[in-house]
Image (tube, rainbow, N blue to C red):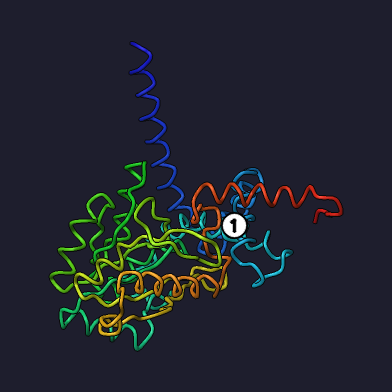
Amino acid sequence: MTAEPKARRWVHLVLWLGHIHRRLLGVYFAILGPSISYRVSAALARLLYRLLDPIRARSEAQCAAALGQAVSSDEVPGIAERAFVQRIWDLTDLALADRLIHAGTYRRYGGGIPEPDRTRLLDAQRRGQPCILVTGYYGPFDLLPLFLGYNGIRAGVVYRPHANRAFDAYRNRIRGRSGCELIPVDRAAGRLGEILEAGGTVAVLADQPAERHGTPVTFLGLPTTAMRSVGLLAWRFGADVVVSGIRRINDEFRFEIVVADVLDHREWQSWEDPVEGVTRRYLRGLEALILGDPGQYLWCYARWGDDLARDLVLDQLGARDAPGHSPA
């Protein structure tokens, strides 16, 4: 047997063992319950975070630069670490949601969309009014499709497939079982237009930097480029835009759906540049969402691009090495 087939067999074995491990974690978490499950996974996440120097440096540098005067410098390390723990908790959420969240229990865990926003979304759905739900890498965002469907919102939700196909199938089984359609990002361009043209609702993560043809903006005070796709879709199909997200309450298996802004399609029709106006408006909504609890934003993600992330890390390291700086 050649080296290549042997390597391939080892890769398949590792992936299979990883899938079994995740299934067993689901069983363990179900037995332990949410409180102990979160404590165990938080301890592991903090250990991992302290071992991963590049992740920690980027998280703290971006957090410090973006939050500016909103928090003191002493608070930044704790906020950045908590955000990393929150991201690891997303895996725990999926394992617990698989057994705990269904049509009869979702409200018990805080999955109800607040009024009057739920009624507004359902009414738009009944009338065939196109709607774009915009969110970001904030809180346990993987659970949003599950809660949307149980609230009666049948949305097409764009997602980026995970490299591990077994995990991707597991995650999608849980996220899609309440009725939302999960759309891989490589199919989004065509499918989103079809849904909106039919008067439906779509949901997208829209806080990624645009690689090209983006709108120059500031996001949380830092320069970046924003994707124009939300604004273009809203303008082409006359869609309402709703900026929303989900956050964890008290570091427990309990959540809150937050609607940060609602932009009615009639409001922007008279604007000189509706695409740019919608883009800037939804970014302000995402900023408000994040500032409501910055410890739930994914600060290790290079939201402002890899170049700026690297520069911020170097600036922070330079400040720490400067004369007179005393380490915490």
Locate residue 95: give its quadrant.
bottom left
* Count of all numbered marks drawn on residues in the image: 1
- The residue under the point 43% across, 61% down is 216
Secondary structure beneath dot 1 equals helix
Furthest residue to the front? 272
Outermost residue toward the bottom in this view: 116
Q: Amino acid at mark 1?
A: Gln
**2 above or below 291?**
above
* Mark 1 residue crowding within 10 angstroms, few (<14) / some (14–19) / many (20+): many
Q: Quadrant of the C terminus?
A: bottom right
Quadrant of the image containing the N terminus: top left
Choose top left, top right, bottom left or bottom right for residue 136: bottom left
Q: Residue 128 at what x, y percent from top left?
A: 15, 79
322, above or below 231, in the image: above
Residue at (43%, 77%) from the top-left corner? 258
Q: Position of residue 215 (x, y in %)?
A: 39, 62
- The percent position of residue 158, horizontal first and vertical second, equals 29, 59
- Residue 157 place in picture, x, y as percent: 28, 62
Q: Residue furthest right?
A: 324
Residue at the limit of the structure toward the top, as seen here: 1
Q: Which residue matches tag 1?
A: 62
Tell me what residue is drawn at x 24 percent, y 82 percent.
122
Query: 127 left or right of 108?
Result: left
Q: Is residue 181 above or below residue 46?
A: below
Say left or right for 215 vs 321.
left
On the rendered structure, is 12 left or right of 199?
right
In front of the other: 131 or 310: 310
Above/below status of 134 relative to 311: below
